[in-house]
């Protein structure tokens, strides 16, 4: 590390739809880089010392909660775990995640989208008896490998990067998107969920569902949790094609 | 005036809040959850390590049960907890975890047969029972006699929160996201809901309810470096304090976790040490066995954090531009284990430190982590002084953690408290019709409106970001792991000055809708009040108990301090909270105060301790034929709701 700290140049999308007369624009901010600086740290510094109106969303700041996806130099990623040192020329352009309702500046309403997605895929264990389980008794057994496999698909943090990177979604506004497929794959794998293939077909057996996917796989490229979109979407498709 | 009516208003969409909401909804009461953020992003998602429940299915958990869990929890709390609550908790935790299994959590399971683990730095082969194959397994955690911490690889909190929120969605429970509760509505000692600001539009609304539950998590952000999420600012706790009627309990009880990465303070889970990781100093020397020969790295958190600090003070820390630190070594666990069970840790090391923990040591230091204190409640979860106000989870001082909580007992508390308190919330909704006048509601809305208008029109004044940074620094420097009288006095003084300055905040960005500076301006005065409760409580408590370690009063003083601190702020024009105390009754304890078994015992005994021990001996003798359940009933009858009274089954043991 040289003694001379770099000055980073941030180009940030600014627009507050609730402010009368406000127009979308790019604004430049300069920040002196500190060792180990992340975009989370830099944005907070800008807010605290330069422009207190700057909007963005962070919660865990540790790459765990999925709040902070944005487009960083053209690529969707979690801003909290992106080090500024990764950018050789010190220029960083930040845009809000496309495909979601804009709240303001870098803040988008992924929460609303994800709740609708969860309702649409009925993101819960379908078992008429789940509420009558006698939880004093030993739990139902599960194969340890199956438990691990379910967890692999459950690692999605609903960050929305896959949705924003999806070309199909851009053409079909109601396209379920990869996050929805991953959720369905997770429940389809779970022996506790008693839904039949026909029931899953009802949810995704159409062009806004798994048959609409053009397999361009932007989703897999940008998923910060490295979920296996390609294999799972192919699996769901085969499963649905048999119906 | 926008008014929304419901039966059960739950402030907070983390594990605790959602579980309370599910309980009141399932009992047929109209329920609304409020959250600053989408519920699935709540801080509960960050828990990696696991949830304690005495299922005893894995071989190292053999022989575990409610009683062993109870003993660990009480000892862990340094006898500061409410033993009735600890009892309700340990008895209900196995049910909670099994219910979550039915709701979809993919708990890691026992695999029958041999497996290699690392214990005390050595590779050891253990053999899991074939009859336990497929049951929920557990890992080792600090301060526990058995391997009791159940987990899902390294994403326990995430999978629990997803299952819980999915259940809430299934039940159609509305979660009003990006809403912040700013004040509680109350009259004549009864709470009727909250005044809430929409963080997008800025609109204020009154959410009027029969029962109101605060489940807003901890107050870690009172400190500048913490493992907590940026929203863990204690606002829910503060609005309870600001009623002037509700009290906060043990606010000075703040936990520091031994292993957060340096400098950013992101946590590496206790599972690292539970699974066999070691702590090393600048010479690569494993120092914990010198201090704690028995439990070593897996002593209780408060103990490990202090030992690390002591060791660094001896000059054994690794120097760095951010101050000294120590090393966490998990290289001995091997790539396969790390990539499966500690993957989140690996990602954190790669992204934030640029190192590979499979090959390199992790720089760590004790860091603020957990708030034992919070809204004081009785065992039913209700405030003893403000009727209709409930609290659950980290926000509450239900008080099963006393002065130190065990790893894995917190996510367990959120769910168990959610189940138990949720039933009492529903009972309250059944018994209490809503009686509140529109005038009262209007009064509370107007009060909040005025505060915001004042902020928006003031031309010159204090910068909220600067005030917050100063408060956080005072807490770091003077109200940390080791505390002493002079520093605490200074902290109290300096915070009082900040409190006064916080009355004159002015904004640069003066709009009432979505505005991060306004959010800060609303929160900072509340946070300073909480910081004052912490520092003042710590200054007055002239003993050391659990995480509260006074260098000038190193002994645990049961004679004078077996009592819970209560903070109230009845008069908003004063500069300090009122502090009072609530005695813990030794003669009612199932487990009277004794030694925790760390270091040299340094305890001033309570005069009743021996008396109660003798009494318990008598009861045992007189009932020598009684089983453990009858005996427990005799020693500590607890108000567990009927639903959760059943005995818990364990493999190889049945319901015994
Ligand atoms: C990094 C980390 C790892 C951890 N690991 C473990 C572990 O392995 N095992 C364990 O047992 N414990 C662990 N803990 C502790 C545990 O995760 C927390 O104590 C617990 O999850 C808190 O849950 P909660 O429901 O009480 O609050 P939270 O999950 O913090 O939820 C708080 C909710 O309140 C809402 N809220 C806050 N203020 C307001 C307001 N004013 N108005 C409206 N809504 C509001 C928020 O939006 C959020 O939904 C860990 C903690 C940390 C920091
Ligand atoms: S699948 Fe991956 S990219 Fe898509 S929302 Fe989940 S974590 Fe984000
Ligand atoms: S803030 Fe949680 S993932 Fe970035």
Image (cartoon, grey):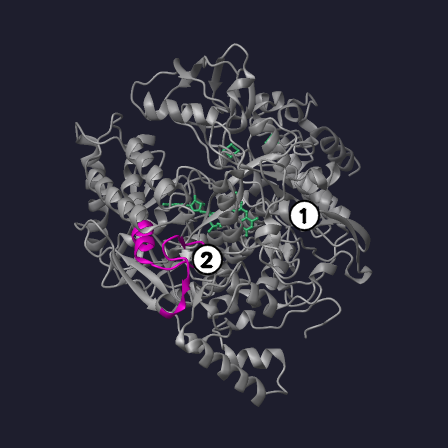
Q: Which residues are magenta?
A: B533-559
Q: Is residue B172 left or right of residue B472?
A: right
**Image coordinates for residue B255, horizontal then vertical, percent:** 46, 50
Residue closest to the eye, B49 or B8: B49
Mark 2, other Cα within 10 Å: few <14 / some 14–19 / many ≥20: many
- Image quadrant holding the N terminus of chain B, namely top left
Residue closest to the eye, B598 or B5: B598
Question: For mark 2, what is the residue?
Answer: B546
Chain holding disc 1: B
**Image coordinates for residue B48, horizontal then vertical, percent:** 59, 45
Chain holding disc 2: B
Q: Residue at x 66, y 62 (%)?
A: B55
Q: Is residue B642 left or right of residue A123?
A: left
Q: Secondary structure at mark 1?
A: loop
Q: Residue at x 26, y 52 (%)?
A: B242
Whether marks 2 and 1 lie on the same chain: yes
Q: Report how far apart the C-alphas of labels 2 and 1 lie in the structure.
A: 24 Å
When asked about the image quadrant of residue B384, the answer is bottom left
Question: For mark 1, what is the residue?
Answer: B275
Q: Secondary structure at mark 2?
A: loop
**Image coordinates for residue B404, horizontal then vertical, percent:** 47, 56
Q: Quadrant of ligand 2?
A: top right
Mark 1, other Cα within 10 Å: few <14 / some 14–19 / many ≥20: many
Residue closest to the eye, B25 or B280: B280
């Amino acid at each position: 590390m040289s003694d001379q700290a770099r000055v980073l140049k941030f180009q940030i999308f600014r627009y507050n739809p609730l402010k009368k007369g406000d127009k979308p624009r790019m604004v430049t901010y300069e920040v002196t880089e500190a060792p180990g600086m992340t975009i989370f740290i830099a944005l907070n510094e800008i807010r605290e010392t330069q422009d207190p109106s700057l909007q963005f969303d962070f919660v865990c700041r540790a790459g765990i909660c999925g709040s902070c996806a944005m487009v960083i130099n053209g690529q969707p990623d979690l801003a909290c775990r992106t080090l500024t040192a990764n950018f050789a020329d010190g220029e960083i352009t930040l845009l809000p995640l496309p495909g979601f309702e804009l709240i303001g500046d870098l803040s988008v309403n992924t929460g609303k989208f994800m709740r609708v997605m969860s309702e649409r895929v009925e993101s819960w264990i379908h078992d008429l008896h789940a509420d009558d389980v006698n939880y004093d008794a030993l739990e139902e057994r599960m194969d340890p490998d199956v438990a691990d496999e379910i967890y692999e698909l459950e690692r999605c943090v609903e960050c929305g990067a896959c949705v924003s990177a999806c070309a199909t979604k851009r053409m079909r506004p109601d396209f379920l998107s990869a996050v929805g497929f991953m959720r369905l794959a997770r429940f389809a794998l779970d022996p506790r969920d008693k839904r039949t293939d026909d029931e899953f077909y009802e949810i995704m057996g159409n062009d806004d569902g798994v048959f609409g996917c053009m397999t361009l796989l932007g989703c897999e490229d940008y998923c910060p949790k490295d979920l296996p979109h390609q294999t799972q979407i192919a699996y769901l498709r085969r499963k649905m094609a048999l119906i | 005036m926008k008014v929304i009516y419901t039966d059960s208003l739950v402030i907070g969409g983390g594990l605790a809040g959602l579980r309370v909401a599910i309980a009141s909804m399932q009992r047929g009461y109209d329920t609304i959850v409020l959250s600053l953020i989408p519920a699935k992003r709540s801080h509960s998602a960050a828990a990696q390590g696991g949830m304690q429940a005495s299922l005893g299915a894995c071989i190292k958990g053999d022989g575990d049960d409610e009683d062993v869990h109870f003993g660990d929890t009480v000892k862990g709390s340094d006898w500061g907890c409410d033993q009735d609550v600890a009892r309700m908790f340990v008895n209900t935790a196995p049910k909670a975890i099994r219910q979550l299994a039915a709701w979809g959590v993919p708990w890691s399971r026992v695999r029958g047969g041999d497996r290699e683990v690392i214990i005390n730095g050595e590779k050891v082969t253990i053999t899991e029972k074939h009859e336990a194959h497929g049951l929920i397994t557990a890992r080792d955690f600090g301060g526990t006699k058995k391997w009791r911490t159940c987990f899902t690889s390294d994403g326990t909190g995430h999978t629990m929160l997803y299952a819980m929120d999915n259940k809430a969605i299934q039940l159609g429970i509305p979660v009003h996201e990006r809403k912040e509760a700013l004040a509680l509505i109350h009259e004549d000692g009864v709470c009727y809901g909250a005044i809430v600001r929409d963080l997008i539009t800025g609109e204020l609304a009154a959410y009027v309810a029969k029962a109101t539950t605060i489940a807003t998590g901890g107050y870690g952000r009172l400190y500048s470096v913490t493992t907590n999420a940026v929203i863990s600012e204690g606002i829910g706790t503060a609005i309870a304090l600001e009623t002037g009627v509700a009290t906060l309990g043990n606010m000075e009880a703040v936990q520091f976790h031994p292993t957060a990465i340096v400098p950013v303070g992101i946590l590496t889970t206790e599972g690292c040490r539970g699974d066999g990781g070691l702590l090393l100093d600048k010479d690569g020397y494993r120092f914990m066995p010198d201090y704690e020969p028995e439990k070593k790295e897996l002593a209780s958190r408060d103990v490990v954090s202090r030992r690390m600090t002591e060791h660094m003070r001896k000059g054994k820390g690794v120097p760095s531009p951010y101050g000294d630190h120590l090393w966490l070594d998990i290289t001995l666990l091997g790539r396969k284990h790390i990539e499966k069970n500690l993957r989140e840790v690996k990602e954190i090391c790669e992204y934030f430190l640029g190192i590979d923990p499979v090959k390199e040591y992790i720089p760590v230091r004790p860091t603020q982590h957990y708030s034992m204190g919070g809204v004081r409640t009785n065992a039913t979860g209700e405030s003893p002084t403000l009727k209709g106000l409930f609290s659950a989870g980290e926000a509450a001082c239900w008080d099963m953690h006393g002065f130190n909580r065990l790893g894995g007992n917190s996510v367990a508390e959120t769910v168990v408290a959610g189940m138990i308190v949720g039933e009492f919330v529903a009972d309250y909704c059944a018994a209490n019709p809503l009686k509140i006048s529109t005038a009262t509601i209007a009064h509370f809305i107007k009060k909040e409106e005025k505060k915001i208008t004042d902020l928006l029109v003031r031309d010159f004044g204090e910068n909220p970001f600067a005030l917050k940074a100063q408060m956080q620094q005072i807490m770091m420097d003077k109200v940390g792991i080791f505390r002493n009288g002079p520093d605490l006095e200074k902290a109290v003084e300096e915070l009082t000055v900040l409190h006064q300055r916080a009355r004159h905040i002015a904004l640069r960005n003066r709009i009432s809708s979505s505005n991060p500076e306004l959010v800060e301006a609303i929160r900072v005065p509340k946070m300073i009040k909480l910081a004052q409760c912490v520092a003042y409580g710590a200054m007055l408590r002239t003993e050391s108990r659990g995480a509260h370690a006074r260098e000038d009063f190193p002994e645990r003083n049961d004679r004078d301090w077996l009592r819970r601190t209560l903070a109230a702020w009845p008069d908003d024009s004063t500069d300090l909270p009122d502090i009072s105390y609530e005695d813990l009754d030794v003669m009612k304890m199932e487990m009277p105060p004794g030694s925790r078994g760390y270091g040299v015992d340094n305890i001033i005994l309570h005069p009743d301790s021996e008396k109660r021990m003798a009494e318990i001996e008598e009861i045992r003798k007189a009932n020598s034929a009684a089983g453990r359940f009858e005996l427990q009933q005799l020693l500590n009858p607890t108000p567990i709701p009927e639903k959760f009274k059943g005995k818990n089954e364990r493999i190889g043991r049945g319901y015994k």
